[in-house]
Amino acid sequence: MLRWMVPGGAEADFGRFDTKTVIRKVYIMFSGSLPPVAADNQEIMDLVDSSAPFPPWLSEEDLAEYGSLYEKSGFRTALQVPYRTMMLPCGLDDGQIRAPGLVIMGEQDYIMKFPGLEDYIRSGKVKEFVPNLDVTFLAQGTHFVQEQLPEEVNHLIISFLNKHCE
């Protein structure tokens, strides 16, 4: 994460490959349950062999579509949010978001291994900043839970909207 916060680094790493290969590597790398960590002398894209198996819930057609979209737009926005904007002030007077919020996470998401994050979410401490937050964990989900389990995620989103838009 820290490497992608600095403009130029990820772009140089990604630029060594065609767009479809970058997308493939990202999906393989971030679909695991352990955080990918590159050594100081390694680039993050080198952590994944391009021939590694692709997640079964994402098709070659999906990969081609994503590759085509990123080919047109580049990776700038994907790197801005969240990597390059997470530490910027967001203009909240008291640091709280009062609007209802929904977080849907996979139990197997690698970010749950970041020190303190799982406890921060599960203990409810996150609600000090987002008091009206609903958090749901999907047992088999990974980092891309919305693509891995779309029916469950869509059901949760529709239920959340129905609850708050009456």
Image: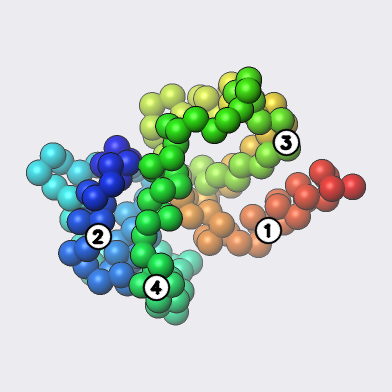
Q: Residue at x 61, y 27 (%)?
A: 92
Residues at marks 2 and 1, CA–CA distance in whole angstroms: 31 Å
How far apart are labels 4 and 1 at the CA level? 28 Å
Give me the C-alpha separation between circle 2 and circle 3. Answer: 36 Å
Q: Nearer the viewer, mark 4 or mark 1?
A: 4
Q: What residue type is labelled 4?
A: Lys
* Residue 22 position (above or below residue 120): below
Residue 124 pos. (x, y %): 62, 24
- Is 8 on the left-hand or right-hand side of 131? left
Residue 106 to residue 95: above or below = below
Earlier in the chain: of badge 2 and badge 3, it is 2
Query: Badge 2: how crowded within 10 Å, few (<14), some, or many (20+)?
Result: some
Residue 130 vertical position relative to residue 79 in the rendered view, above or below: above
Q: Which residue is drawn at 63% across and 20% down?
A: 94
- Residue at the spot of label 1: 154
According to the image, label 4 marks what residue?
A: 72
- The residue mark sitting in front, 2 or 1, is 2
Q: Name the residue under label 3.
A: 99
Residue in the picture at 72% in, 36% down: 99
Q: On the image, numbered disc 2 is attached to which residue?
A: 14
User: Which amino acid type is marked by label 2?
Assistant: Phe
Q: Is residue 108 visible?
A: yes
* Sequence-first disc among 3 and 1: 3
> In x, y percent, where is residue 34?
34, 43
Spatial separation of the CA atoms under disc 3 and disc 1: 20 Å
Question: In the image, what residue occupies the spot 25% across and 60% down?
Answer: 14
**Label 3 neighbour load within 10 Å: few <14, some 14-19, many 20+:** few
